[in-house]
Amino acid sequence: MLDKILLAPYYGILKLRHAMYDHGVMYKVHKCEVPTICIGNITAGGTGKTPHTEMILKTLLNSDDWAYRNVAVLSRGHKRTSGGFQLVMRGGSPKFFGDEPLQIKKKFPAVTVAVDRKRAEGCEFLVHPELLKTSKRARKCENKDIETSDLIVLDDAFQHRALKAYFNIVLVDYNRPIYKDKLLPLGRLRDLPERLHYADVIIVTKCPTYMEDEEKVQWAASLGIKDYDLETCRGIDPKGEPKMVLFTAIHYCPLSPLYEEADSRYIYSKKLVLFSGIAKDTPLRMYLSDNYQIVKRFKYQDHHNYSRMDIASITKAIKTWPTAVVATTEKDSMRILDYDKIPDELKVRLFDVPIEVDFLSDHEREVFYDTLMTALRNFRKDY
């Protein structure tokens, strides 16, 4: 009861904000001229937005409809030092662009990746790149040579109500059910739980690789989705509308070297030093523990910028365990590669752990693919 009293003002503010956007009071909602796919959440951090963004890109680029079209990604670029609209370059700095947009650009070089805190204006630049040469907001944009985008994937824009995305995918962490969570600062909910039902698709992420059908039905019910059907992957939400609920799991890939001078023999070591700056490293530790004894762990805040002292601490650890391999995440590797004074003895044993996400079954993957492609084909009709 006490937590509800303490959170009442925040709940009221969020409720009022959404109502003002919904009814067009004071706030204007913009639409984009091309299809936009928003991948977001209502929980602060850790639901897997970046690997799901990458999964969506693979889905689009492998489809007959979008393989030869200009697909773009627009992100805020969390904790970046640059301002306004910027086009992400593969050889750029994570400090300038943000680590996650840079990671996406390196994995998908043919995709236009941009960062802009104002998503509506960012979409306008991507659809009308000629504005980059005339707009005051684009004066600090270092690269202005891009083609017109035919589709935009919005990374973490569900709370950005100034832009109405065409297709909303909202992620929910299997390990942190919404019905057990609370609004910030007493919990990790960054938005009202009922906002979940404004998504076109709800994806429960970080699931075990196998779930019984009964558990999927129970999970859908816990999200307020009644009469969940395993064949259609849909149930009925509290508004009385059909809602799709799908389930994905993280798949860790083999260790990948960060530097050319890395010695692959370290992969076969039995000991491992782990460092990361992510919201939650428990799944990664569990995966690595199957093959390694984690002799030292360095846990930093999400999007941590590594300092000389951090690198010195990690280097000291490998002197204590001279045969240990050193591992980190893909996201952290972007910031490490930007640090130009990594000792040689660390470079030879430093690897990252790439991750991918996929649906728990071929059937769910097919249902999602058909739903997404059908929605995109109907863009002009519905939007």
Image (spheres, rainbow, N blue to C red):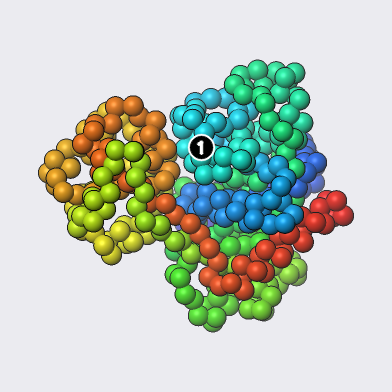
Image spot of residue 231 (x, y percent): 66, 79
State the residue at coordinates (72%, 19%): 133
Circle 1 residue = 102
Q: Judging from the image, what secondary structure is the residue with disc 1 in?
A: helix
In the displayed orientation, state which residue is furthest to the left: 320
Residue 367, above or below 89: below
The residue depicted at 48 percent of the width and 49 percent of the height is 45
Toward the right, the furthest residue is 381
Within 10 Å of disc 1 (Cα), the crowding (few <14, some 14-19, many 20+) is many
Residue at (62, 24) in percent of width and height: 143
143 left or right of 208 in image: right
Q: Nearer the viewer, residue 234 or 286?
A: 286
Return the x and y of residue 297 as percentages of the image width and height. Answer: 25, 49
- Residue 317 in percent (x, y) is at 17, 42
Going by the numbered disc 1, the residue's amino acid type is Leu
The answer to whether residue 287 shows anywhere in this view is yes
Q: Residue 337: x, y in percent?
A: 38, 34
**Is residue 322 shown above or below 4?**
above
Q: Residue at x 26, y 45 (%)?
A: 263
Instruction: Specify the quadrant of the image occupied by residue 62.
Output: bottom right
| Residue 313 showing in the rendered view | no
